[in-house]
Amino acid sequence: MTDEYYMLQALKEGRKAFEIGEVPIGALVVMDGKIIARGHNHVEKLNDSSAHAEMIALTSAFHFLGSKYLPDATMYVTVEPCLMCAGALFWSKIGRIVYGADDEKNGYRKYVVPLPPIKEAGVGPWPFHPKTELLSGVLKEESALLMKEFFKLKR
Amino acid sequence: MTDEYYMLQALKEGRKAFEIGEVPIGALVVMDGKIIARGHNHVEKLNDSSAHAEMIALTSAFHFLGSKYLPDATMYVTVEPCLMCAGALFWSKIGRIVYGADDEKNGYRKYVVPLPPIKEAGVGPWPFHPKTELLSGVLKEESALLMKEFFKLKR
C-alpha cells in the first residue's frame, strides 16, 4: 500500500474528530503494512489539552505491541506534529513519520530542524530519533482543507 | 508553603518511581496551595515511552478540575521537562513551572529558549504559554542525586 492510502485512512480519523467538534487531525501507526493503532483529537471530549491524535495513536500502539518503542513502525498524521507530539515521537523511536499539511502556528518546525535534507535551515537540533525518517506533504491539500473547514465553522 | 516544600513532595513521587525501577522523576500540580495532582514516571510499568511524570500529573489535574487549561496552577517537577512535556505544559497554559535539576541530555532547553530573563540565549522561541512563569534550580542537588543513584545502579 502507498503512503497516500494510509494518509486517506488517517484523514478518515480526522473526519471523525471533525464530526464531534474536535480539531480535525487524525493519526495511524502502521507496521508491516498493517494499521495497528488509530487516533483522533480528543481534547474537548476528555478535557485534556494533551489528548492529540498522535499521543492517542502512539499509546494505543504501545499497548498493542507490548513495547514502548516502535522502530519498525510508521506514524501517519494529517497535520504537522506540535512540539509535544514531536517529543513523544522522539521517545517512541518510531521508524518513520509521514505527515500531510504544514502547521505554521503550532508545528514543531517553529522550534527545531524541519526536515533531514535541510538540517541547517532549522533553529534547533533535529528533535526525532537519529534514525527516524520523515516525509511531509502527503495529501496536504485534503488535510489543510479539513482544518480550514473546521475553523471556518468555529468562527 | 514554599517552593521547597512542594518540591520535597515532588521528590517523594520521584522516589516512588525509583522504588519500582523507573527513572526517578516526580511531579505535582498545585493550585491555591493544594496539591491537586501527583505523578511519577511509568514508562516501564505501562510500556509507554510517553508516560512521564509531568504527563501523568497534568492529565490527572485536567480530570480533577474538569478543565483542559491550568492558568492558576503550578507544576513542580524534580527534573527539567523534556520537549514532549514542555509541549504538554504549553498546551495546558499552566501559570507557573518550577523544576529542580537541569537535564543537559534530554531537557527542552536543548531546543528552545531556556529561561525568560535570558530569552536571547536559546536557539528557538519560548516554548511555553507567553504568560507562564518559570523557576529552575529548586532542590536541584537532591533531584540530581536521585537520578545519579538510579543510573549508577542501572550500569
Image (cartoon, coloured by chain):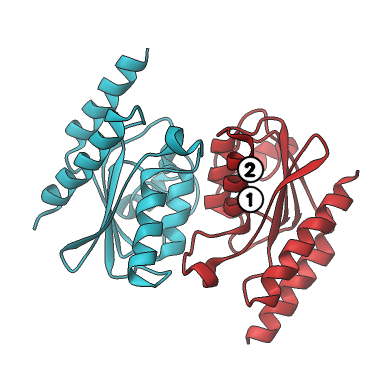
Chain colours: A cyan, B red
Q: Residue at x 15, y 52 (%)?
A: A3
Q: Mark 2: few, some, or many residues within 10 Å (few <14, many ≥20)?
A: many
Judge if badges 1 and 2 mark residues of a common chain: yes
Residue A85 percent location from the top left of the image: 43, 49
Q: Is residue A139 above or below residue B42?
A: above
CB within 8 Å, label 1 to label 2: yes
Q: Is residue A21 above or below residue A107?
A: above
Local secondary structure at mark 1: helix
Q: Residue at x 42, y 63 (%)?
A: A92
Q: Which mark is residue B25?
A: none
Q: Residue at x 47, y 65 (%)?
A: B48
| Residue located beneath label 2 in the image | B61
* Kind of residue indicated by mark 2: Ala
Front-most of residues A7 and B59 = B59
Q: Residue furthest top?
A: A155
Residue A127 percent location from the top left of the image: 45, 55
Q: Residue at x 26, y 36 (%)?
A: A16
User: What's the chain of the residue with tag 1?
Assistant: B
- Label 1 to label 2: alpha-carbon separation: 6 Å
| Residue located beneath label 1 in the image | B57
Front-most of residues A43 and B100 = A43
Q: Is residue B101 above or below residue B74?
A: below
User: What's the chain of the residue with tag 2?
Assistant: B
Residue B1 percent location from the top left of the image: 91, 43
Q: Quadrant of the C terminus of chain A?
A: top left
User: Is residue A127 visible to us here?
Assistant: no
Counting the numbered discs, the total is: 2
* Kind of residue indicated by mark 1: Ala
Q: Mark 1: few, some, or many residues within 10 Å (few <14, many ≥20)?
A: many
